[in-house]
Amino acid sequence: MEEIILTTKKRISQSLNRDYRLFFVNSATFGLFSILFDSNFSKIGIPDQGGFKGFIEIPNLLKKKYVEFPTEKGIIIPKFNKDIDAFLFTSLSGYMRSNPSKLICQETNRMGIVSIEDISGTFPDKDFGWADIIYCSTGSPKILECGYGGFVGISTEINLKESEKVLSFSHLPTSYYEKLYTEVENSNTKLNEIRDIVKIFYQSSLNIPYRDSKSLSIFVKYENPNKLLERLNRIIRPKSGKSLFTKCPRYDRVKENGFVIEAIKLYGMKTEEIKEISEKVEDLI
């Protein structure tokens, strides 16, 4: 057991930008809870959209204050006030648009703010993951898809004894580490294949205002998505999950009317099948 844990840690570390103490957790939500549990954090900055919904829920649960920072329609502007202890963000805003991870972390470091980055949508892309603390979900559907679990990395340059104590409570079976190791080995290929799926939709006539080469999702602007999504869900089924579509506006995607096509749920399908789905969406609109 100890050997597979060490081997998995070593393999993950090779895909990261900094030296981290790695902790494996039953879920990424528990991982984030454990991080924010630390008494070093009393006031937390979050983006006003495009983040993980736990950015709002977990501080509330821990009775800690959070402050929403304005973004450019989800993209974080790396300017901060030193009235927060930590800043939470995702590598990909809403799984759709690349945040300037390195610039954000340079600025938070200059201000004495701890940066915390969700890398679930970009691992193992080294353009992302520059924060003092990183965490990654390995649930479903994800780049590292184990069905549950995740990991947290705390930079060797900071000390969060309380968080590390809570993180140590998580215990996972040997089968999890074996699966995770395989997922890490295949992650770069999977990530690129999902990005290629997104590009197929970019070639359509759909109203897609945000186009990012590293996106895992596609936002389609549409004024009244309710009835349309009812029709889409009756006709189009993803390879995994109940629905291929996410209605907007919503905090963890984008605060505009329309819907998101979750390309990660089409992973494993043939190009011809994906093009057919794209054409069906166009026809129904």
Image (spheres, helix red, strand yellow):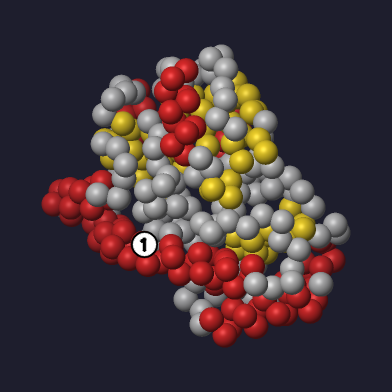
Depth order, front residue of 71/268? 71
Q: Nearer the viewer, residue 172 or 225?
A: 225
Asked if residue 281 can be seen in this view, the reply is yes
Residue that label 1 marks: 188
Query: Amino acid type of disc 1?
Result: Asn
Residue name at image x 67 percent, y 38 percent: 72
Which is more toward the observer, 211 or 180?
A: 211
Query: For this view, does 280 lie left or right of residue 21?
Result: right
Q: Where does the C terminus fall, quadrant-wise?
A: bottom right
The image shows residue 43 at horizontal and vertical percentages of: 55, 19
- Left or right of 240: which side holds 117? left
Residue 149 appearing in the image: no
Left or right? Give the position of 4 relative to 79.
Answer: left
Q: Residue at x 47, y 25 (%)?
A: 107
Q: Residues within 10 Å of mark 1 (few under 14, many from 20)?
A: some
The image quarter in which residue 109 lies? top left
Q: Residue at x 71, y 56 (%)?
A: 209
Q: Secondary structure at mark 1?
A: helix
Judged from this view, the residue extending furthest toward the bottom is 272
Count the marks: 1
Position of 284 relative to 108 (above/below): below
98 over 113 or under it: above or below: below
Tell me what residue is drawn at x 38 percent, y 31 percent.
132
Image coordinates of residue 4 in percent, x first then y, are: 18, 54
Q: Residue furthest left?
A: 3
x%, y% of residue 143? 43, 59
Q: Nearer the viewer, residue 267 or 199?
A: 199
Residue 212 lies, in percent from the top left, at 58, 56
